[in-house]
Amino acid sequence: MRQSVRKKIYPVRNPIHYLANRILLRLYQASVVDTYGEIPISTLRKGGDQFVGILKHSLRLIEENDPRRFARVVRHVDLFVDCSHPGGAYSASYRHLINVVEIDFEYCEERGDSLFHAGYYAGVIVHEATHGKIRKFGIDTIRENRVQVERICRSEENRFLNRLNAIRPDLGNRLKRPFNPEDWHGHWHSSRLTRALRQMRRAKEKDKETSAQ
């Protein structure tokens, strides 16, 4: 099981931020419940079987239908974790200091079946792994380039999703999302404190959902 963190290729600008990420990594590693190949899968929720099942299905979809992008995932992701996210359900992010993909997992039968959800999260994984590839080139996401970076990641996500039309007619077309910078407005134009408070509220929501199950 891979537990190491790859070295960054650009300087650490904020040691406190780096330390906080290392503490998070230890928490995530302590919550590992399964693996896909050598990639650990972690969850901070009780009863995370559904997350694990869907995530492994998502990774199989990438591996079987797009080996090149799957190799990108293996190269740039050291761990997947289900945790609360300030963006809410179905959102995700890539923590480049520790090569972790955080996913705020949600499953809603009204949106679609297990294949639909596996396809959706597969697209998310490709998107976040592309962030990892961009970081590997030493390109930090800053105000001046963030629109371009997200456009690249969304394009890669949609190119992968096109391949899912061969599995189920129109599946990829249903999952594809056009690029719109407004999708990131809440993240780009809010403070870290605001995002932290959103994340705390979301964590409480997820706890209630788990308790009600």
Image (cartoon, rainbow, N blue to C red):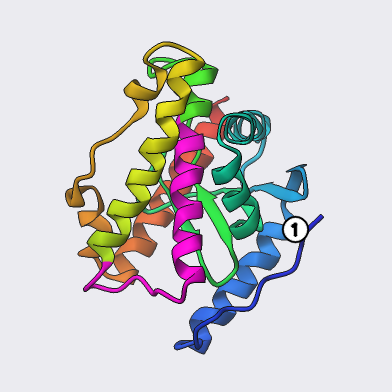
CA neighbours of label 1 inside 10 A, class few (<14), some (14 to 19), many (20+): few
Give whichever of 93, 122 is nearer the camera: 122
Q: Position of residue 46 (x, y in %)?
A: 66, 39
The structure residue drawn at horizontal position 46% and vertical position 54%, both measured from the top left corner, is 130
Placement of 104 over or under 132, stated as above or below: above
- Indicate the amino acid at tag 1: Ala
- Magenta segment boundaries in residue numbering: 120-145
Question: Residue most toward the front?
Answer: 68
Q: Secondary structure at mark 1?
A: helix
Label total for image: 1
Q: Position of residue 87 (x, y in %)?
A: 35, 49
Specify whether residue 107 is in view: no
Placement of 138 over or under 53, stated as above or below: below
Give whichever of 53, 156 is nearer the camera: 156
Q: Position of residue 134 (x, y in %)?
A: 44, 64
The structure residue drawn at horizontal position 66% and vertical position 72%, both measured from the top left corner, is 6
Question: Residue most toward the right?
Answer: 1
Please tell me whether residue 134 belongs to the stretch shown in magenta. Answer: yes
Q: Position of residue 65 (x, y in %)?
A: 57, 29
Please tell me whether residue 133 belongs to the stretch shown in magenta. Answer: yes
Answer with left or right where residue 15 lies relative to residue 41: left
> In which image quadrant can residue 61 be found?
top right
Q: Report the magenta stretch's main SS.
A: helix
Placement of the C terminus among the 4 image quadrants: top right
Placement of the N terminus among the 4 image quadrants: bottom right
> Label 1: which residue?
30
